[in-house]
Image (cartoon, coloured by chain):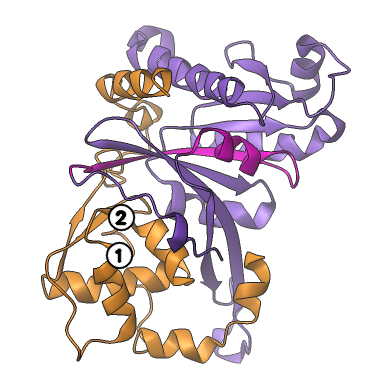
Amino acid sequence: MSYRALDDEDPDRLYTVTGGRSTVAEDSLDLVTLIVSECDPTPDMQSEHVRILQMCRRPMAVVEISSHLGMPVGVVKVLLCDLLDTNRITARNPSSAAPKASKARKAQLPDPDILKQVLVGLHNL
Amino acid sequence: MDSTTSEHVPLRSTASDGLKIVVVGGFGVGKTTLVRSVSEIRPLSTEEVMTQAGVGVDDPSKVQDKKTTTVAFDFGRISLTDEHVLYLFGAPGQQRFWFLWDRLFHGTLGAVVLVDTRRVEDSWYAIDRLEHHGTPFVVARNNFEAPQHDLETVRDALSLPPGIPLVDCDARDRESSKHVLITLVNHLYALATADQEVMS
């Protein structure tokens, strides 16, 4: 069960994985930002980076990477930022998660063209 | 947490735009069941942690323990087109979860509130929070057993305004779960294309 998995988690391990940094990448990556590897892993990389590069040969969402690595989303975002900064991965950000410019109700409604695509996709299921 | 590399279904290499729909509901109401019914992958789970340092405390330096909120959630996905991938999140309706709503579900298309009529009160809070966040939603009553009330009674019990769709579903059934999602997207489409005047 996921609750137990985290409670049993040694906090020091997550601290080590990120080099003690907290969630610097908070706003630049969304749960459904798709990550794509731009290179192969090298032997000097930390194991989490290696696994991410292997996983993302085809696009994979941040939340899926988090699940496969067994680490909270915030920790994974820090790892991804390392790889982004060194151009080892690219990020395809969702069109719907634009910056929180406006709190207005209208601004939150999705683009009708995208909704049409979603409808077609659901009907084809 | 899950690790299902054995059943890994990769996305198309052209996938570029992730979309989100959130299914909210109390424990055991059938969120994961609904996600599983329509997802192309077996539902995965993960979590997010939020640390809140001494909110409302005069001298934070005297606070020994930071309050940590952990929220677990599961998800599945549906590849809609070459570019668009829809992620469906099953999220708990409990109070601590809403601390993380903006962080996790900002930009979500909309939400489905899944209701168990034996525990209607579980849904009040979720509906209240969605209205507060301005997230459009529909309500689906999940019938693992034969329903005991008609939908109008349920609407009254939820104090649900007439404009918000309320439908029956069986979360175990793919067509039924599809229907719930289509109801939501139709509702979103109607809202998104409505006259500015009507929105007042």
- B70 sits left or right of B40 in the view: right
Q: Which chain is purple?
A: B
Give amino acid for label 2: Met
Quarter containing the N terminus of chain B: bottom right
Q: Nearer the viewer, residue B60 or A5?
A: A5
Residue B142 occupies quadrant: top right
Number of marks in the image?
Answer: 2
Residue B49: x percent and y percent? 53, 69
Is A16 drawn above or below residue A27 in the view shown?
below
Span shown in magenta: B14-39
Residue A70: x percent and y percent? 49, 71
Residue corresponding to mark 2: A60
- A76 sits left or right of A12 in the view: left
What color is chain A drawn in?
Answer: orange
Of helix, strand and loop, which one carries label 1? Answer: helix
Asked if residue B23 is among those painted magenta in the image, a careful observer would answer: yes
Are the residues at dot 2 and dot 1 in contact (C-beta closer than 8 Å)? yes
Residue corresponding to mark 1: A55
